[in-house]
Image (cartoon, grey):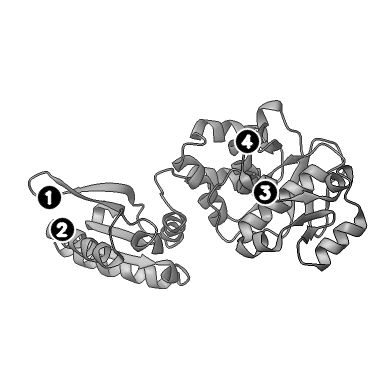
C-alpha cells in the first residue's frame, strides 16, 4: 500500500469519527489541514514537500473515494498510480472512466470518460479500481500527443509492466473509440529499450527529423572484441553513437562513494574508448531537446566524421 494513501483525509471519514465541520474549519484556520478539493484535506507540511505528480495522486485518491458511482481511474491518473514515466503531463483534472452509455463530463477537477471496460481491463492499486497498464497506455495514446504517449509506453515496456502483445490486444478492444488510429501509430513506435524520458523524447525527435533509425542500447566492442561501452543510439550507416545526457547520470545514478567529478571523468574515458574504435559521438541534454535543430546539427556533424572513418 502506498503511504501517500494515508495522507488524504476525507470530510465524510472525519464526520464518522466524530469530527464535525466546525472542528475541520478550525483545523484549516490553524494551518493543520489544507483542502486539495471539496471535502478532502492534507497536512500543509506534506503538501509543501509534494511535487505535482504526488499532488495529483492525492487528488485522485480523494475523488475516487468520494465518488457516489463506481468509477475506474484511467488515462493520466491511472498512469500516475501505476508510477509510469510521464513528460509534461496535464494534471489539473483527475480522469476516471464510467462503464455506462452516458454521463461523461468535464469539471474543473474531474474528467469523466464513458467507455466499456471488461473485467480484464481493471486492476486494483492501493485499493482503488484502476485501468490496467495495457489499457492505461492505450487510452493515454488515444487522447494525448504522440511524444507524450511514446514516453509513457516506453516506460511501461522497459519496466516489463506490459508486453507488446498485451498492448496490441488492448488496442484491438478499443478500435471503435475515438483516437484509436492515433494510438496505433504511437504503440507501433514504442520500444522498451528506451531507458528514460530523455531517451524516448530523443527517439521521437530523431524520427521527426527524418534521420536514419538508430539501434538502441548497442554494445560497442574494441578491436579485441572486448565490450567497452553501451550507446543509447547507434547509427550503423554513419558509425555514430548518440548519447542523451540526463542530469541523473552525474547525480542520482552515482555508485556508492562515487562523486560527480569522478563520474564526469569516467564518462570522458568511456567516450575516448568509443572514439578509439573509429566511431563518432554526438551528445545532447535536456536543454538541447527544447530546440531540435541543435540535436540534429550535433548528429549531422557526427555523421560527417563517422562517414570519413
Q: Quadrant of residue 52?
A: bottom right
Mark 3 Cα within 10 Å, few/some/many (few <14, many 20+)? many
Q: Residues within 10 Å of mark 1 (few under 14, many from 20)?
A: some
Mark 1 vs 3: CB contact within 8 A = no
Relative to the observer, which residue lies in front, 130 or 259?
259
Helix, strand or loop status at disc 4: loop
Q: Position of residue 291 (x, y in %)?
A: 45, 72
Residue 134 vertical position relative to residue 277 in the rendered view, above or below? above
Mark 2, residue position: 273
Q: Which residue is mark 4?
A: 132
Task: Work out how far the residue at label 3 is from the one at label 4, CA to CA, in angstroms.
Answer: 12 Å
Could you tell me if the residues under marks 2 and 1 are in contact, i.e. CB atoms within 8 Å? yes
- Can residue 142 be seen here? The reply is no
Question: Residue 77 bears which disc, if any?
Answer: 3
Whichever of labels 1 and 4 marks the residue nearer the N terminus, that label is: 4
Return the x and y of residue 17 as percentages of the image width and height.
86, 43
First of labels 3, 4 by sequence position: 3
Name the residue rendered at 62%, 56% in the picture.
53
Q: Which residue is mark 1?
A: 222
Q: Secondary structure at mark 3?
A: helix
Tell me: 153 left or right of 48: left
Vertical placement of 1 versus 40: above or below?
above
Q: Quadrant of the C terminus?
A: bottom left
Q: CA distance from mark 2 to mark 1?
A: 8 Å
Amino acid at each position: 500500500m502506498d503511504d501517500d494513501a494515508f495522507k488524504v483525509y476525507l470530510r465524510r471519514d472525519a464526520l464518522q469519527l466524530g469530527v464535525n465541520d466546525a472542528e475541520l474549519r478550525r483545523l484549516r484556520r490553524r494551518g493543520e489541514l489544507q483542502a486539495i478539493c471539496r471535502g478532502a484535506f492534507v497536512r500543509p507540511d506534506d503538501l509543501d514537500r509534494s511535487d505535482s505528480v504526488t499532488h495529483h495522486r492525492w487528488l485522485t485518491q480523494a475523488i475516487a473515494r468520494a465518488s457516489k458511482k463506481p468509477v475506474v481511474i484511467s488515462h493520466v491518473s491511472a498512469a500516475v498510480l501505476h508510477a509510469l514515466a510521464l513528460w509534461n503531463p496535464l494534471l489539473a483534472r483527475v480522469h476516471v472512466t464510467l462503464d455506462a452509455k452516458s454521463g461523461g463530463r468535464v469539471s474543473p477537477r474531474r474528467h469523466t470518460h464513458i467507455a466499456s471496460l471488461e473485467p480484464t481491463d481493471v486492476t486494483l492499486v492501493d485499493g482503488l479500481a484502476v485501468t490496467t497498464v495495457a489499457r492505461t497506455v492505450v487510452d493515454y495514446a488515444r487522447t494525448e500527443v504522440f511524444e507524450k504517449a511514446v514516453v509513457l509506453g516506453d516506460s511501461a515496456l522497459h519496466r516489463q509492466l506490459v508486453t507488446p502483445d498485451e498492448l496490441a490486444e488492448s488496442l484491438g478492444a478499443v478500435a471503435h473509440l475515438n483516437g484509436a488510429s492515433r494510438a496505433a501509430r504511437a504503440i507501433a513506435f514504442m520500444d522498451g529499450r528506451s531507458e528514460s524520458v530523455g531517451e524516448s523524447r530523443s527517439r521521437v525527435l530523431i524520427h521527426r527529423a527524418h534521420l536514419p533509425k538508430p539501434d538502441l542500447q548497442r554494445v560497442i566492442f574494441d578491436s579485441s572484441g572486448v565490450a567497452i561501452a553501451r550507446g543509447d543510439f547507434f547509427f550503423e550507416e554513419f558509425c555514430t553513437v548518440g548519447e542523451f545526457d540526463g542530469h541523473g547520470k552525474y547525480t542520482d545514478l552515482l555508485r556508492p562513494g562515487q562523486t560527480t567529478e569522478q563520474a564526469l571523468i569516467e564518462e570522458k574515458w568511456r567516450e575516448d574508448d568509443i572514439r578509439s574504435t573509429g566511431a563518432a559521438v554526438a551528445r545532447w541534454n535536456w536543454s538541447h531537446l527544447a530546440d531540435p535543430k541543435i540535436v540534429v546539427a550535433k548528429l549531422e556533424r557526427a555523421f560527417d566524421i563517422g562517414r570519413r572513418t
